[in-house]
Amino acid sequence: MASSIEKQDPQLGPESDKNWAHDHNQDHTLKPAGVLLTFSNWSESSSIGLAAYTYSLDGSTTWTYLAFAGSALNNHSLIATVQVVQSIIVACGKPFIAKLADSLSRPVAYSLVVFFYVLGYIIIASAQNIATVAGGIVIYAVGYTGLQLLLQIIIADTTTLKWRGLSSGLVSAPFIINAFAGSEVSASVMASGGPSWRWGYGMFAILVPHKAKSQGLVEPAPQSSARGMNKFKAVWEEVDMLGLLILAGGVACVLLPLTLAKSAKGGWANPSMITMLTVGPIFFIAFGIYEWKFAAYPIVPMRFLRNKAVVGAALIGFFDFGASVPQLFLLNTKVALTVFGIIAGAIMRTTHRYKWMLVTGLFIRLFGVGLMIHSRGAKGNTGELVMTQVIQGLGGGFAAVASQVSAKHQNTMPRQLEIHLPDVNSTVRAELFSSITTIAGYPPGTRLGKA
């Protein structure tokens, strides 16, 4: 099947989300309620850029402060456990924020994640022991992963599909600057006589809400006819809170023993470790059954699991970032991913095609991984090893942007063609979906040409 990106009628909106969002008649829909941004407005586009820069600066600096915080509070050994807990929250928080943005609107979700973000950093900055730092990081992680996700959702709401790849790449552009500027900022913060790690965290508790307000996204919640317990029950079901709790429990039970076993009495033989490793897989099985049979609005609808494009994009993300990356080369890869992600978005904007770029990117990334074998060992060439990261970033940038766009395109276009061309037979609709040249062959102004 060809991999063209459809040309959209601007009257239909970037995704026509309202046509496929929820199969129910709640007051709130998936349309971007309260989102006030358009990329034709340069001031508002700049506010997104400033928010993205602040988010990028956070990601490029605050990770260095955790080691200093652990040392200052005389509990450096627990940092690994804190980071595992943070990873669990990041993994399980995105579905929660996404469902919340769908059911209550983007502004409500944005306000909530900003609240968690600021509260978490205030707790960390004022912490007097490592347990308080851990608690603050758990709260902050909800806000951080939410900001990351909502920026991409806002891009999807405010751009057409043909511009989405380039726009997503540009939002990541601040990582190019902060890959170098971030180290200078963190060094200045931790320098002798500098503000110290507490202000390194605390300054983002001031910067982030200011940028969120300038974006116009911290607004009152839309009115709903539901009140009291009925509203709570509706939100509980739409967010699929029970499913998220089961998933989070499973992830926690599997990952936490990996860092706690070393310090636990008896090590891996400790009953708590055995219990968690036993209960974790049971949680995963229960999660699958609950989502399949009982969830009113499942986190992962079964139709997504039957969609090859969605599954493929998920597998690419899973296997590509499954292994840990040494910190020494992480920034090289980040810069390359960002630069080539922007280039990939620009190419897709021009060609309206993504599949060749996705396949090429995966092969280039695989080639870069293969080259690392030649550079292994104590006698390996450092420059050559760094270059392999750049090559992997080239392939990864192409593949990541293409996979993000492909999942949405493959999932929505057939349905949109069916909605807007109900009297056209399925064979013709399949041809329209398969090739952009077929669509371009119909004269402008005709019914098929407009579609």
Image: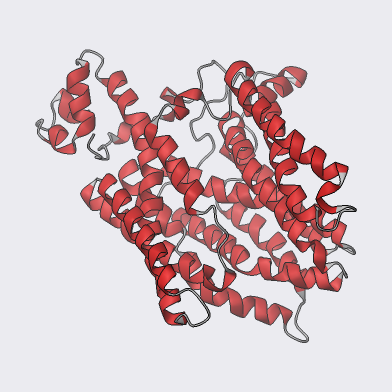
Position in image of residue 204 (x %, y %): 68, 63
Q: In this view, does 237 lie above or below 260?
A: above
Where 84 sits versus 295, above or below?
A: below
**Residue 159 visible in the shown view:** no
Rendering quarter of residue 137: bottom right
Q: Is 206 placed above or below 17 here?
A: below
Q: Which residue is drawn at 43% across and 29% down?
A: 17
> Residue 40: percent from the left, percent from the top?
37, 50
Residue 282 coordinates in the image, percent (x, y): 71, 30
Judging depth in this view, the residue of 378 and 27 nearest the camera is: 378
Residue visible at 64% across and 34% down in the picture: 221
**Residue at the top extreme of this rendering:** 423
Please state, as top left, top right, bottom left or bottom right, where the N terminus lies in the image. top left
In this view of the protein, which residue sits in the foreground, 447 or 294?
Answer: 294
Q: Residue 426: horizontal and vertical position, in percent?
A: 22, 17
Question: Toward the viewer: 134 or 351?
Answer: 134
Q: Is residue 272 left or right of residue 120?
A: right
| Residue 31 appears in view | yes
Q: Residue at x 50, y 24 (%)?
A: 302
- Indicate the quadrant containing the C terminus: top left, top right, bottom left or bottom right: top left
363 with respect to 233 (left or right): left
- Left or right side of 425 for 396: right
Query: Seen in the image, is 322 located left or right of residue 88?
Result: left
